[in-house]
Image (cartoon, grey):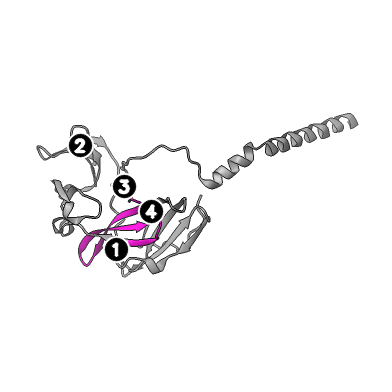
């Protein structure tokens, strides 16, 4: 469990979290972005703080805060190349903002104009950080309550979350949506790749080492032995 963060969250504001691993320092970190409301509009720059597992504390990095709004209604952030990525907006244009877990700074990644200035969702593949390498794969009209892409099926259909209908499947060949009967909000569905690992978090490792050490086992056995001896003496007195 993390310690209490420094910046409080208030109603009508927005709070985003990003989790990642900083390989050079061998440290797991959580970045927290808090937008305070001002006339129901997010006040920029936001308050930003970062939690380090190595130190077990939060610290403010507000000096690095971005001067634009990072969306919290898209799918969960993506951790790629040592940075956490979100979709953001600046002066009416969408962009990708990345937070580098090692340098602890925000950086911007531009996207093509055809994607940056429209409400129609366009799926693209890209060479990381190169705007010219984006390629349009397909276009999905979001006016039917479509909120986000969840994943791709083996039959080339796309899994999407819809505002009212829950999880749906979209066939790009015939441009039709099929309802799957799986209900939920637009935040109910998420899929991502993961790598299995036996790595324990440092504090849990320390507890485990302590609990399984010879000294710890001997101490517990001695404690049990003393309690048994005390119980035997009380029975004899009785």
Look at 13% across and 39% down and name the residue there: 172
Is 80 magenta? The answer is yes
Sooner in the amino-acid sequence: mark 2 or mark 4: 4
* Residue 219 screen position, x and y as percent: 72, 38
- Pointers 1 and 4 in contact (C-beta within 8 Å): no
Look at 29% across and 45% down and name the residue there: 185
Looking at the image, which is closer to me, 82 or 53?
82
Is 191 magenta? The answer is no
Look at 31% across and 47% down and name the residue there: 187
Q: Which residue is mark 1?
A: 69
Sooner in the amino-acid sequence: mark 2 or mark 3: 2
- 52 vs 83, left or right, is right
On residue 18, which mark appears? 4
On residue 179, which mark appears? 2
Q: Which residues are magenta?
A: 78-106
Tag 2: Cα neighbours inside 10 Å, few (<14), some, or many (≥20)?
Answer: some
Q: CA distance from mark 2 to mark 3?
A: 17 Å
Q: Which residue is mark 3?
A: 187
* Residue 147 screen position, x and y as percent: 23, 49
Q: Nearer the viewer, mark 2 or mark 4?
A: 4
Q: Residue furthest toward the front?
A: 24
Q: Nearer the viewer, mark 1 or mark 2?
A: 1
């Amino acid at each position: 469990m993390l310690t209490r963060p420094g910046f409080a969250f208030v109603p009508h504001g927005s709070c985003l979290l990003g989790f990642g691993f900083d390989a050079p320092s061998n440290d797991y970190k959580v970045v927290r972005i808090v937008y305070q409301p001002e006339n129901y509009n997010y006040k920029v720059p936001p308050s930003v703080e970062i939690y380090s597992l190595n130190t077990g504390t939060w610290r403010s990095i507000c000096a690095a805060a971005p001067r634009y709004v990072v969306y919290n209604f898209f799918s969960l952030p993506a951790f790629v190349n040592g940075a956490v990525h979100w979709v953001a907006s600046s002066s009416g244009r969408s962009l990708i903002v990345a937070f580098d877990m090692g340098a602890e700074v925000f950086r911007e990644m531009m996207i093509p104009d055809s994607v940056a200035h429209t409400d129609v969702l366009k799926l693209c593949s890209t060479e990381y950080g190169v705007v010219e390498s984006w390629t349009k794969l397909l276009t999905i009209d979001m006016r039917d309550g479509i909120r986000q892409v969840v994943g791709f099926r083996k039959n080339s259909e796309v899994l999407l979350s819809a505002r009212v209908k829950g999880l749906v499947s979209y066939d790009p060949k015939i441009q039709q949506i099929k309802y799957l009967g799986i209900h939920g909000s637009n935040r109910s569905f998420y899929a991502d790749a993961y790598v299995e690992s036996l790595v324990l978090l440092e504090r849990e490792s320390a507890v485990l080492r302590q609990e399984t050490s010879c000294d710890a086992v001997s101490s517990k056995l001695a404690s049990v032995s003393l309690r048994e001896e005390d119980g035997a003496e009380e029975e004899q007195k009785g």
